[in-house]
Image (cartoon, grey):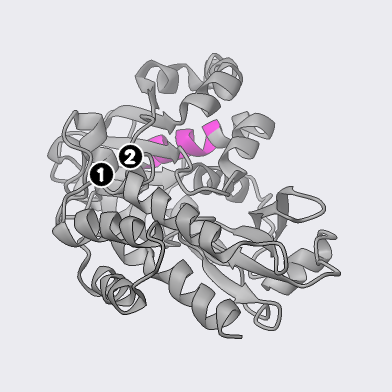
Amino acid sequence: MINKTKIIKEISDAGLVGRGGASYPTAQKWVAVHDALKTKKIGYIIVNGAEGEPGVKKDGYLIEKYPETVIDGIFLADEYLGPNKIKKIYFFLSKEYYRKYASGLKKVLALKKYKRLAEKLEFFIKPEALAYICGEETALLNLIEGKKIEPRLKPPYPTTSGLHGHPTLINNIETFYNVSRVNRGKYQEDRFYTITGAAKHRGVYQLPINLTVEALLRKTGNYPDWPFFVQVGGEASGEVLNAKQLDRPVEGAGSVMVYRAKGTDKHELLKYWLKFYRDQSCGKCVTCREGTYRLWELINRKKMDYPFFWEIVLALEETSYCGLGSSLPLPIKSYFNNIVKK
């Protein structure tokens, strides 16, 4: 048994936030689920490790290198919420991650300490289609329930009415990893960063939190000596910054994509972003369903109708139902404002 008051205080004092991209306070979410379970018989835990955002590789790195620490964090969550209250735990992984790392996780789950946890933990494989929208908590709930993969109206939130209408804790793999370290007094106010693209030393790095983009690139030997720009937060939804804008923290899921300023084709880059969003739109709202499709049509015409293009981008930003459609304008607008017009 764990001391529930102590572990929540430790998580809160450490300032832990979710590492799936939203950065919601971990202690606050755990307490919300715990309180909701006072009036509900059962609840669920979902471990999100599918990494639908291109360019983010930290979760795969964690379950490969530190499977026992991740499992221990899940164990602590189960103990805090009440082993008799949590009916099932779903470990959400991509097909690639499951193939590569499930055996290592299962070896840990076979340990005596985690026997009870293993009995109710089930691996859930991410579908090939609509992988990105599954990063939205309520869309993930629909997927597990066998419903159409699309976001739900909030409130209610998953913490009070999640899977099958029961309180549900949904956290990223890195969050569970950090909870375990906090509990053992090993947490050092760090986080994981993924560096991709034209960088010299691509990979996943564990470094202090709140590093600026420039500091991260210099610490890892990835600061280019040629003209460049970066995309921070993911290769699809991340903000694009020029080399003079790097004095700001790396936020979100901690991804930095490095581009060569003189070797990147503007048209092809826009096509990459627009194709991704067109393919990943769940189709729930007209703005996103039609908007992403029309943008893809426009980018493939011989002559771009820019007034119409920006009209659609603005509509997506202001009226999309969920974060998928409303995140599309960020890379496009920042690219034009910080790189093209520079």
- 304 horizontally vs 207: left or right: left
Front residue of 125 and 112: 125
Q: Is residue 74 magenta?
A: yes
- Which image quadrant for residue 104? top right
Looking at the magenta stretch, what is its main secondary structure? helix
Q: Amino acid at mark 2?
A: Leu
Residue closest to the eye, 30 or 192: 192
Q: Give the percent coordinates (x, y) of residue 71.
A: 53, 31
- Local secondary structure at mark 2: loop
- In the image, the segment drawn in magenta is 71-80
> Where in the figure is residue 232, as x and y percent of width and height?
58, 65
Which residue is under mark 1? Answer: 139
| Residue 170 drawn in magenta | no
- The residue that mark 2 highlights is 130
Question: Mark 1: which secondary structure?
Answer: helix
Establish if 149 lies above or below 178: above
Q: Residues within 10 Å of mark 2 (few under 14, many from 20)?
A: some
Mark 1 residue crowding within 10 angstroms, few (<14) / some (14–19) / many (20+)? many
| Residue 21 screen position, x and y as percent | 46, 57
